[in-house]
Image (spheres, rainbow, N blue to C red):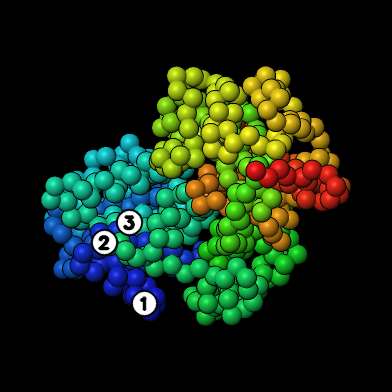
Amino acid sequence: MINLLPSQRRFLRGALAPGVRTAALSLPRGEGKSTLAAYILQRCMTPGDALFEVGAEYLLCAASIEGARHVYRPIRAELEPTGEYSFLDSQMRLGITHKPTNTKLRVMSSNAKTAFGIVGTPLLVADEPGAWEIVGGGLLHDAIQTAQGKPESSLRVLYVGTMAPMGAPGHWFYDLVDAGTQGSTFVQALVGDAETWDKWPTIGKANPLKAKYAESRAVLLEERDAARRDSRLKARFLSYRLNVPTQDENAVLLTVDDWKLATARPQGLPVGKPIIGIDLGGGRAWSAAVAVWESGRIEALALAPGIPSIEDQEKRDNVPSGVYVKLMRSGALTLAQGLRVQPPSALWESVVDRWGIPVKIVCDRFRLSELQDVVGNASTIEPRVTQWSSSSEDIRALRKICRDGPLSVDPGSRNLLVVSMSSAYVESDKAGNSRLIKRASDNKARDDVAAAAVLAAGAFQRASSAPVRELKYASV
């Protein structure tokens, strides 16, 4: 048995309190999460303990069978000397059975197909859900949570893990932790301060267990010093040592801090006619439009193919279940019903219906002639040549108006922009130029809205810095 830390005892009191059905503990790496998971499951398998139920089957879920071994091995080490247990330990399966009572512990990987038969399970421990495969892990979470609704089910679920590497708004584990304690859900999280990330009081507070030992403290400080010099290492340090999911600042379009500045800014008014950036997609890609007004206010909309279904598109793109459906319900995402490729005319109709005729449209040259056929003489179209220099200028413009203003974000567009921005990656050359790139060659990343936002921001910045005598925006 381990000697529990005060924070671990506090979590157990909350997680095992009457009326709590779901509990989540999120801590940085190396803070005893797996040890605590092993402790809980060992209690479940120990006759006489308050968590032990004769003949029950307890479950341990992990990203993989191999990943579950660091929880399984301490349990086996404690129980095996008693001689009362049998053990299943192979490459494909892990399990423990208390022979006198046939009480079992079964290990399952993050595969939803194995989770729909959860019956007679009083308690399930989910280890490091932030590392679960995106689609399979989301489906597994759905299967676990809906198992709680079965008649006479007493299932209690404990999620224990660091939010990285998958942690971001829209991922179910991130959203669970971010929502905090409410109703039958108890949440305890230890998250560092991103503003003071390299100060020892912040680091030590986020790592109370490692801070107790001189050798561990030295490792943390060494990693901190390296992170000060390298943004990639800074992202890793924030994600795993402070439990603040972070991408490399040089590889993402906007950092979390940039986005917070933009969304915290008072909303500008949509007065006059906006400039609109348009990204027309083909095949799997969406078509997207982002409008920016002279006040700096931006709004976004997207159009997806109607075939395949939106649920199938979620699975194909490896996004958590329900993300696209929620965007549709909000009105930010619409479908080209019955079509595999959404026509420019449908996007243009949505643009005019929502924002009226824009003062200018900015787009890349892909499908330019189709857009010209649809828009006609209604608005000026500025095709943007896709070059390192122009891409860098537009990306810098978006980052600048996010950080220094006046960019503000329409609340109804925020979720759509978050989904797309989180998929938008930047490639830089040796000269410091930047451009958007696809995260993978299979076109699963929905960065279409982000691409439209980059085009709109660049045009906004050019209009804002144009001589006063030139027409920048039109008022109505």
- Neighbour tally class for label 3: few under 14, some 14-19, many 20 plus, Cα within 10 Å: many
Location of residue 118 (image quadrant): top left
The answer for how far apart the CA atoms under marks 3 and 1 are is 20 Å
> Residue 434, how many percent across, how many down?
77, 45
Q: Nearer the viewer, mark 3 or mark 1?
A: 3
> Residue 326, how many percent across, how many down?
42, 42
Q: SS for tag 3? A: strand
The answer for how far apart the CA atoms under marks 1 and 2 are is 28 Å
Location of residue 155 (image quadrant): bottom left
What amino acid is at disc 3? Val
Residue in front for this viewpoint, 399 or 97: 399
Q: Earlier in the sequence, mark 3 or mark 2?
A: 3
Q: Earlier in the sequence, mark 3 or mark 1?
A: 1
Can residue 20 be seen? yes
Note whether 32 is above or below 383 in the view shown.
below
To which residue does mark 2 refer?
184
Tag 3 and tag 2, C-beta contact below 8 Å: no
At horizontal 47% and vertical 66% (from top left) the residue drawn is 27
Q: In the shown orientation, is residue 24 left or right of residue 59?
A: right
> Residue 167, how many percent across, how many down?
50, 53
| Viewport quadrant of the N terminus | bottom left
| Viewport quadrant of the C terminus | top right
> Residue 395, how many percent across, how many down?
74, 47
Q: SS for tag 2? A: loop
Q: Nearer the viewer, mark 3 or mark 2?
A: 2
The disc placed on residue 361 is: none
To which residue does mark 1 refer?
3
- Neighbour tally class for label 2: few under 14, some 14-19, many 20 plus, Cα within 10 Å: few
Can residue 236 be seen? no
To which residue does mark 3 refer?
125
Note whether 367 is above or below 397 in the view shown.
above
Q: In the shown orientation, is residue 245 left or right of residue 438?
A: left
